[in-house]
């Protein structure tokens, strides 16, 4: 393995148990004695490397395994086969509202996620920087998150995630819901994170964003990497899918 | 150290979420057994032959509620934390563990209140009461094991949760909590003895409301039950935990 590489996947395969029980489950279970679960392969023989400071885009149709790939990289899913090496710390995966507890207020969510992330609970600096970045008012942050609009949820989630200075930032289609000003701000933040030499994994359905942010990209099709290379070329490939 | 902070944060979240939008809040932990106690005093005290019924029923009820609360709340703990599990890399076992810790906190509070209140009903203070600490630890270990089995199976078959809440009252009446043990005729004593909770309730009741020390046999029975339950639960949980994320 290249010592510069932060993430290295070597023929990684991920499969899930899929509940195979239909409406006749009990009868099937008794008569056929078949396994109630089938093993469904989501990612098949994935190999790639991400170097330190590299930004990699992940493109693909809906259901091609992008989120599963991100979760595997973040260590949430244990692969069934292959070798996976990771040398770095992660910020939580950024997806719309990911990890936010809807019954809790904005402030409570910040404290919960910060301490789950292993930060000191009374880290006022971190909380202040989240509040500043999210541009949400004090009144809003005292409301339970269930009353937030999806844009507000995205603001909160993005702000909490970038407050963790981790080596790898994982962004899963979060920018689409914010308003223009916040999208702009997120992009600036992403450029800043990139300039600091951190690694970004970026999932998006907007090839233009991917070209702007990423150096390299992979195109996923049905759980296998069909194309891999420079971001610009892969985005063209992606566009030609439709 | 980092993990302790995480479990603490999750336990705190559990307490906040449970009593959100409730007026008396965490005091429900105290009022619930108290209401049950009142009902039991009205219904059972006439027919029971126990001298000190309030003390007898309380010593069982407090522990039963600990058990019932832990299992009910943690059975869905993994499913309801899907958002966090899918975005943050923290050991999944922390979710049922944090439930048991927030309930343990509740139990300690409840025991403290009842220890004071029950003095009036004839609770004798002595060093023997300190034996409640190992008894609670054993009971927690047993409960944790059972909880791990229930919550990990519930991820794949949601029927487990429904089945458990339905069967729980049966388990409650199978345990001599509201009625004295002497009420059970020989015919049914086998059934009660198959119920593992019986031993833990008997142990804590022996410590709180009876003058004698619990026998060595009883301690060993509880120790074995707790050990077996915990090991079995941990084994099943570990076997299944990698597949949780595909089903939540």
Image (cartoon, coloured by chain):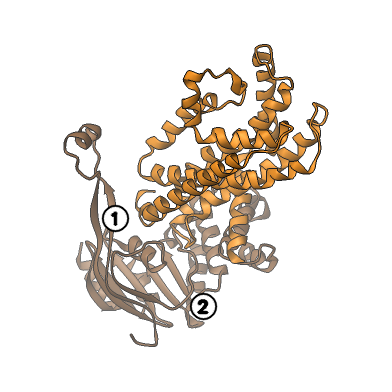
Chain colours: A brown, B orange
Structural crowding at the residue carrying mark 1, measured as other residues with C-alpha within 10 Å and reported as few (<14), some (14–19) or many (≥20): many
Q: Position of residue A115 (x, y in %)?
A: 60, 61
Residue furthest to the left? A32
- According to the image, label 1 marks what residue? A16
Structural crowding at the residue carrying mark 2, measured as other residues with C-alpha within 10 Å and reported as few (<14), some (14–19) or many (≥20): few
- On residue B29, the disc is none
Q: Position of residue A109 (x, y in %)?
A: 59, 54
Q: Quadrant of residue B176?
A: top right
Q: Is residue A213 left or right of residue A230?
A: right
Q: Is residue B237 left or right of residue B203?
A: left
- On residue A192, the disc is 2
Q: Is residue A18 above or below residue A183?
A: above
Q: Residue at x 47, y 55 (%)?
A: B92
Q: Is residue A97 above or below residue B23?
A: below
Q: Residue at x 36, y 65 (%)?
A: A72
Q: Position of residue A111 (x, y in %)?
A: 63, 58
């Amino acid at each position: 393995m290249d010592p510069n590489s932060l993430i290295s996947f070597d023929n990684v395969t991920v499969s899930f148990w899929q509940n195979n029980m239909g409406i006749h489950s009990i009868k099937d279970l008794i008569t056929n004695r078949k396994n109630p679960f089938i093993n469904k392969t989501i990612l098949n023989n994935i190999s790639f490397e991400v170097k330190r400071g590299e930004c990699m885009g992940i493109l693909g149709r809906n259901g091609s395994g992008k989120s599963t790939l991100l979760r595997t990289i973040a260590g949430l899913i244990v692969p069934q086969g292959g070798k996976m090496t990771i040398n770095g710390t992660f910020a939580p995966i950024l997806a719309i509202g990911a990890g936010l507890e809807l019954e809790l207020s904005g402030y409570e969510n910040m404290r919960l996620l910060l301490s789950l992330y292993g930060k000191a609970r009374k880290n006022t600096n971190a909380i202040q920087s989240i509040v500043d970045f999210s541009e949400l008012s004090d009144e809003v942050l005292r409301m339970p998150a269930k009353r937030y609009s999806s844009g507000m949820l995205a603001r909160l989630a993005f702000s909490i995630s970038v407050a963790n200075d981790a080596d790898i930032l994982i962004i899963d289609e979060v920018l689409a819901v914010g308003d223009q000003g916040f999208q702009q701000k997120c992009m600036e933040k992403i450029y800043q994170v990139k300039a600091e030499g951190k690694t970004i994994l970026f999932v998006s359905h907007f090839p233009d964003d991917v070209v702007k942010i990423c150096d390299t990209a992979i195109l996923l099709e049905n759980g296998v990497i069909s194309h891999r290379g420079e971001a610009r070329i892969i985005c063209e490939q992606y566009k030609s899918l439709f | 150290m980092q993990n302790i902070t995480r479990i603490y944060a999750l336990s705190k979240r559990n307490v906040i979420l449970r009593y959100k939008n409730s007026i008396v809040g965490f005091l429900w932990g105290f009022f619930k057994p108290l209401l049950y106690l009142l009902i039991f005093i009205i219904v059972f005290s006439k027919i029971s032959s126990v001298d000190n019924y309030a003390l007898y029923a309380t010593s069982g009820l407090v522990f039963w509620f600990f058990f019932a609360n832990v299992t009910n709340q943690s059975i869905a703990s993994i499913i309801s934390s899907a958002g966090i599990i899918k975005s943050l890399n923290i050991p999944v076992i922390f979710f049922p563990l944090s439930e048991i810790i927030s309930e343990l906190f509740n139990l300690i509070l409840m025991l403290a209140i009842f220890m004071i209140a029950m003095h009036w009903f004839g609770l004798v203070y002595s060093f023997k009461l300190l034996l409640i600490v190992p008894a609670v630890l054993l009971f927690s270990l047993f409960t944790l094991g059972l909880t791990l089995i229930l919550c990990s199976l519930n991820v794949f078959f949601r029927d487990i949760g429904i089945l458990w809440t339905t069967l729980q009252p049966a388990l409650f009446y199978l345990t001599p909590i509201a009625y004295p043990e002497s009420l059970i005729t020989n015919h049914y004593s086998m059934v009660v003895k198959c119920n593992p909770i019986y031993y833990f309730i008997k142990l804590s009741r022996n410590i709180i409301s009876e003058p004698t020390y619990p026998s060595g046999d009883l301690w060993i029975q509880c120790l074995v039950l707790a050990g077996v339950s915990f090991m079995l639960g941990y084994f099943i949980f570990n076997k299944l935990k990698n597949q949780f994320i595909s089903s939540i």
